[in-house]
Amino acid sequence: MLNDTKIFKFGGGSVQNASGVRQLENIIRQHGDTPLVVIISAIGKTTNLLESIISVYRKNDAAELDTLLVRLQHNHYDIAQELLPNNPVLQKTLSDIFSQLDRQLTISSSNDYDYDYDRIVSFGELLSTTLISAYLNLNNLANEWLDARMLIRTDNSFREAHVDWKTTTPTIKNRIDSVVQEKNTKLFITQGFIGGTSDGQTATLGREGSDYTAAVFGFALQASEVVIWKDVPGLFNADPKIFPEAVKLEEIPYEEAIELSYYGASIIHPKTLKPLQNKQIPLYVKPFFNPEEAGSLISSSTLKNSVPSFIFKKNQILISIFPKDFSFIAVQNLSEIFHILSKHRLKINLMQNSALSFSICVDNVGERVDAALRELKQKYKIKYNDNVELATIRHYTEELLVGITQGKEVLIEQKNRTTVQVITT
Ligand code: ASP
Ligand code: MG
């Protein structure tokens, strides 16, 4: 049984300045008085800035580190100042977190880049949520700040940690229940993207992982709905920034939305939907600046009209793998190849095999691809095309396929009844 708790998730783009924070406040005020858990990402481009901070920290470049830290501070204090000028509580809230960050940056870096990354990048969400929670408390929206590192238990796969649902689900539920009972508070503010391991280390769920956090809370609390507030009116059949004629999808069945996010429609983090589907919790994607609009609804509806959807993934690399001894590709080869790909955490966007070769298309994510290629080259002959594009059309027609491949060289084309994928240069 779902209860009346709702989950709202706000991305960094929505809360990038003081007026964004005020709009978040408006939305929370309008929602009514049922329990509400608000998940917030790092403000604006903070996560990218923290990634730069991590890299100069690991290079021991003190001067550059200082410059970047000052920028990070400005971004946050400026918003605080605009929200509530010279407010000592708000400023102290921020300075406490900045001192914690300073402490992390005085520890010498470890051999494990991913571990260092998570313990530092997590400050983006710690800063945004403490700032917003304090601001709302000062503005008569009493709320409880929750530390997601204590609630979302993960394994040690830093930068892409897996949620331990068995521990996480009761932990979240018990914590929320006890605050509701003891303090009579129904509004909770917490961080997207971050969690904690059993030995108390900070771990993150992968870039853009805050949507997934919303699903974790929704699942644990059997929420009546999850709302992802976005700077777009809802989900579209193609990226409206590239295709002005894109149309909004009003109602999407879970399976269809899962397929779309699997193929790379970047609007919702791909891990988000499955836990919600398991509990039949509806997910709304709604426009942050027009909260009364319907947005898009993902639920257990059936697909009414199959509007074709287009997903384009640029910066792909197509790797073809041949046994060195000119033998056929055998199951042992495949198993070895998958093992190498999984070790370097590469996700296969498309694959194809023939008698003599096996081809895969993956995101060209620099270092990890290079490392996998080096390892593959020890056993196989490798050819690759970089800078290729992978296009997917769900509910395609031949005409649409011709439209997107016109004037391009097609390297691979794969079709099933609903979906076509093409790799082009
Ligand atoms: N702040 C994190 C990122 O930018 C998580 C998120 O925004 O969902 O990747
Ligand atoms: Mg973000």
Image: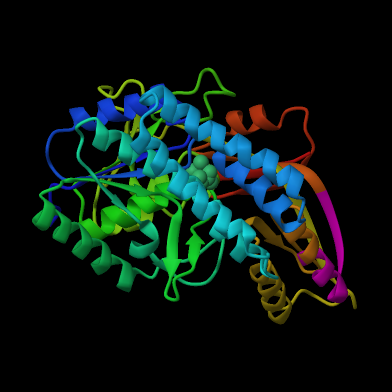
For the point 76% across and 57% down, which residue is it?
367
Specify start and end residues of the magenta stretch as a single range. 372-385
When the figure is inspected, residue 327 is found, relative to residue 319, above or below; the finding is below
Q: Is residue 224 left or right of residue 248?
A: left
Pick whichever, 212 or 200, lies toward us. 200
For the point 31% across and 41% down, which residue is it?
133
When the figure is inspected, residue 125 is found, relative to residue 44, above or below; the finding is below
- Give the total number of marks visible in the rendering: 0
Q: Position of residue 280 (x, y in %)?
A: 24, 53
- Any magenta on residue 323? no
Describe the colour scheme in one phrase.
Answer: rainbow
Residue 130 seen in this snapshot: yes
When the figure is inspected, residue 264 is found, relative to residue 110, above or below; the finding is above
Pick whichever, 98 or 310, lies toward us. 98
Q: Position of residue 419 (x, y in %)?
A: 53, 45
Pick whichever, 177 or 209, lies toward us. 177
Residue 233 seen in this snapshot: no
Q: Position of residue 192 (x, y in %)?
A: 41, 49
Q: Position of residue 333 (x, y in %)?
A: 74, 77
Q: Which residue appears farthest toward the bottom when viewing the image?
A: 332
For the point 78% across and 28% down, which residue is it?
407
For the point 86% across and 58% down, which residue is it?
383
